[in-house]
Amino acid sequence: MTTDTSALASAEPDPPKQSSRVSRRRDRRKAEIVRTATELLSANGYQGMSLEDVAEQTDIAKATLYHYFSGKDELVRAVLEALTVDVIVRLEAALAEVEGRSYLEQLRALIREQVRILTDTAPEVATVFSWPKSWPESFDEIIKDSRRRHDAIFRTVVEGGIAAGEFDCPHPDVALHCLHGVLNQSSLWIRPSLDDDKKVELREALVDTASLMMGIRDTGA
């Protein structure tokens, strides 16, 4: 007697979809917890953020949080990583829009998007990353890594511009440090209380000024 394995295989029920639904629901809840923690971290800093507040604002029991994160520090690390990835994705998208154009246009696009992030679309980035000194030393490396990944996007454009002869920048490391310092202060200049036209005016003025740090060569001759 032989067994028709193909018939048996076709008779097997489809894999249950319950596990995928549970996984998606868990991912959504985890993302909600991270968003809430981001808001609290932005408003209160590391010391002022508590798991109790996160639990209350997400309307879950504190004990339930431990099904998603082992503790406060793991949750904060998730916040820092989510913010870093979000900024990088936004910057890469802005860069993609000017692909093939001059390095100056690419740099201007990055500066403009970074200022927009810090003052409009994701202001929590400015507040969260402005408080590293009050955090435990265990966060030093993740913050440094976030900054390195962020800096790499600008550095690629700057180094490309130098190699192409568009930028006259004998000390790119110094120039990049200065550039990031200026951009990090933009949230103090372009305040939420300003009207939209004024924000655009200041943003473009900052783009014009900050891009000059790279020593733009006159290629019109």
Image (spheres, rainbow, N blue to C red):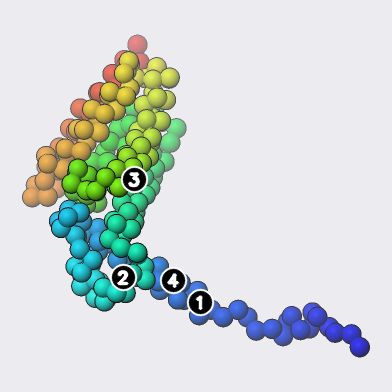
Instruction: Residue 85: tell me if it is visible.
Output: yes
| Mark 1 burial class by Cα count in 10 Å: few <14, some 14-19, many 20+ | few
User: How far apart, in angstroms, are the residues tagged by discs 2 and 3?
Assistant: 22 Å
- State how far apart marks 1 and 3 are (Cα): 33 Å
Report helix, strand or loop for mark 4. helix
Residue 71 versus residue 158 in the image, above or below = below
Q: Amino acid at mark 1?
A: Ser
Which quarter of the figure has residue 55? bottom left
Q: Position of residue 23 (x, y in %)?
A: 46, 72
Say which quarter of the image contains residue 62.
Answer: bottom left
Kindly identify the residue that appears in the image at 36 percent across and 26 percent down. 158
Q: Is residue 212 left or right of residue 22?
A: left
Residue named by callout 1: 19
Label disc, if present, on residue 142 of the rendered structure? 3
Disc 2: which residue: 65
Mark 2 crowd level (few <14, some 14–19, many ≥20, 10 Å Cα)? many
Image quadrant where one finds the C terminus: top left
Crowding around mark 4 (Cα neighbors within 10 Å: few <14, some 14 to 19, many 20+) is few
Which amino acid, mark 2?
Leu
Q: Earlier in the sequence, mark 2 or mark 3?
A: 2
Tell me if label 3 and label 4 are in contact, CB under 8 Å: no
